[in-house]
Image (cartoon, rainbow, N blue to C red):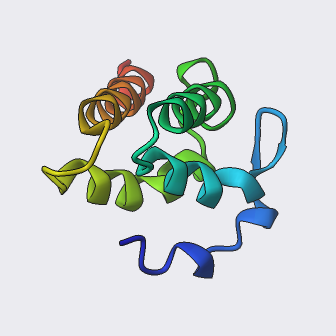
Amino acid sequence: MFEGLDDIEWSKMHHAYGTAEEVPVLLRELASVEDETRSRALSRFYGAVHHQGDVYRRTAASLPFLFELAQDAAAPGRAAVIELLVSVGESAIERLQF
């Protein structure tokens, strides 16, 4: 899972609170079997990577990995990841409306 995640130059992207270097950690934590770990990662993802519902380059770069999690029927916390993907999609659509 997450093939290519470490090939992305996250340090050259920024999120709401600094560089996006933590994004790979957050994505891996979203796949954790520990509820608290997943919850903390999801909260941080919403707060920093998908900050106030915005869609940035770092948000787009994380999408393939979020979809990978969403496709895994056995992934713990899958529903929360799908809700995150829906939020990103809705935000993107809102910004395209005239």
The image position of residue 64, as x and y in percent, is 36, 61
Q: Is residue 63 above or below residue 50?
A: below
Residue at 38% across / 31% down in the picture?
84
Residue at 37% across / 51% down in the picture?
66
Q: Is residue 78 above or below residue 22?
A: above
Foreground residue among 29 and 17: 29
Residue at 24% across / 31% down in the picture?
79
**Left or right of 11: which side holds 47?**
left
The furthest residue to the front: 34
The image position of residue 49, as x and y in percent, is 63, 38
How many marks do you count on the picture?
0
The image position of residue 48, as x and y in percent, is 69, 32
The furthest residue to the right: 18
**Left or right of 79: which side holds 66?**
right
Q: Which quadrant is the C terminus positioned in?
A: top left
The quarter of the picture where residue 44 lies is: top right
Q: Is residue 94 above or below residue 37?
A: above
Residue at 77% across / 33% down in the picture?
16
